[in-house]
Image (cartoon, rainbow, N blue to C red):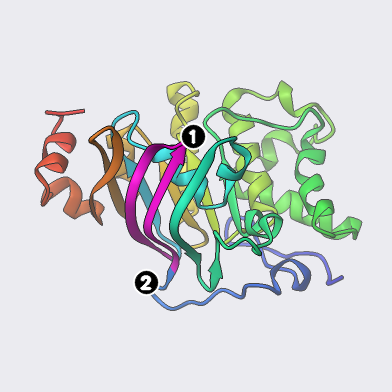
């Protein structure tokens, strides 16, 4: 086991040899980390979304927007195969995490979900202490050194702006935290494993406006350090925090991709009439 993690740049822990030996980051600008080609998701034969094709660049924040029922969450869940846990779900097409074929039967799903973490709409801390919530995934992935765990827990809490709030009560129940703190703890829980990609499914929708603003600011700080894909119904939020945007719509009873582009292009110079109507508030 390597020595304790160092805390640098807002507490982001430097990778240990054990946790990051499988994927060394590449600093190349606009490197594609996640690529979807003609992805379709269906449930018991009913198509939820069809033929979605786009790329996500390293260190960028991509927002998936569109009206309810257009398949945003289904598409997000396919990226780390959470759809495997849904009876009757089927994903077709191709998803690649760099060199890894995500949908291949031989893909190690446990390791995939370490590389692609997920934050859900409703905060879901484990029914244990704050400290244990962050230590558990480290131990599950083979980290045994107590000092390594302590440094990583502190670093993750620093990164989400919670260290000073909870440093004196790390052994208190995580479920006693406020809703906004619980959501930030869940983000910290994902960060301890240093994923390449973080998926967020409407992470602010269950929070009050102040907590929502704190979480939104936190997501913005992940830019450049992690690749982020976020589902949001809040167009203003997407415009504030995203670098790129995927606009989804409902076409013939199933979700479809209307347009992909930079945030500036999508909101200021949309090419598709559906996108123009949606971001302008005329539809959706």
Disc number lying in front (2 or 1): 1
Q: Is residue 247 left or right of residue 71?
A: left
Decide which of 257, 50 is in the foreground and name it: 50
Name the residue: 46% across, 45% down: 76
Q: Is residue 124 left or right of residue 202?
A: right
The local secondary structure at tag 1 comes to: loop
The answer to whether 16 is drawn above or below residue 143 in the figure is: below
Q: Which mark is residue 202?
A: none
Split into 4 quadrants, where in the image is the N terminus?
A: bottom right
**Quarter of the image holding residue 101?**
bottom right
Asked whether the residues under the numbered discs 2 and 1 touch, taking CB atoms below 8 Å apart as contact, a structural biologist would say: no
Q: Position of residue 278 (x, y in %)?
A: 17, 35
Decide which of 280, 8 is in the foreground and name it: 280
Q: Position of residue 186 (x, y in %)?
A: 64, 39
Name the residue: 50% across, 28% down: 211
Split into 4 quadrants, where in the image is the C terminus?
A: top left
Magenta span includes 40:
yes
The answer to whether 96 is drawn above or below residue 74 in the figure is: below
Name the residue: 42% across, 23% down: 209
The answer to whether 14 is drawn above or below residue 126 in the figure is: below
Label 2 or label 1, whichever comes before in sequence order: 2
Mark 2 to mark 1 CA distance (whole Å): 37 Å
Give the main secondary structure of the magenta stretch: strand
Residue at numbered disc 2 = 30
The local secondary structure at tag 2 comes to: loop
| Residue 218 visible in the snapshot | no
| Residue 183 visible in the snapshot | yes
Looking at the rendering, the stretch of residues picked out in magenta corresponds to 33-57
Mark 2 surroundings within 10 Å by alpha-carbon count, few (fewer than 14), some (14 through 19), many (20 or more) = few
Residue at numbered disc 1 = 44
């Amino acid at each position: 086991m390597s020595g304790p993690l160092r805390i640098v740049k807002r507490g982001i822990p430097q990778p240990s040899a054990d946790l990051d030996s499988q994927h060394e980051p590449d600093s190349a600008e606009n490197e594609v980390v996640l690529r979807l080609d003609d992805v379709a998701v269906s449930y018991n034969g009913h198509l939820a979304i069809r033929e979605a094709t786009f790329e996500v660049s390293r260190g960028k924040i991509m927002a998936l927007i569109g009206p309810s029922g257009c398949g945003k969450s289904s598409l997000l869940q396919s990226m780390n195969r959470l759809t495997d846990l849904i009876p009757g779900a089927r994903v077709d097409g191709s998803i690649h995490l760099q060199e890894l074929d995500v949908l291949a039967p031989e893909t190690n799903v446990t390791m995939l979900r370490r590389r692609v973490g997920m934050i859900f709409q409703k905060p879901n801390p484990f029914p244990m202490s704050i400290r244990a919530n962050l230590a558990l995934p480290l131990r599950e992935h083979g980290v045994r050194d107590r000092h390594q765990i302590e440094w990583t827990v502190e670093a993750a809490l620093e990164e989400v702006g919670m260290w000073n709030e909870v440093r004196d009560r790390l052994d208190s129940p995580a479920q006693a935290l406020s809703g906004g703190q619980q959501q930030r703890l869940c983000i910290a829980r994902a960060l301890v494993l240093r994923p390449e990609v973080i998926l967020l499914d409407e992470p602010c929708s269950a929070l009050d406006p102040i907590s929502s603003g704190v979480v939104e600011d936190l997501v913005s700080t992940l830019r450049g350090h992690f690749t982020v894909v976020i589902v949001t119904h809040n167009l203003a939020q997407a415009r504030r925090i995203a670098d790129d945007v995927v606009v989804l719509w409902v076409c013939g009873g199933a979700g479809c991709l209307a347009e992909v582009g930079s945030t500036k292009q999508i909101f200021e110079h949309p090419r598709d009439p559906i996108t123009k109507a949606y971001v302008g508030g005329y539809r959706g």
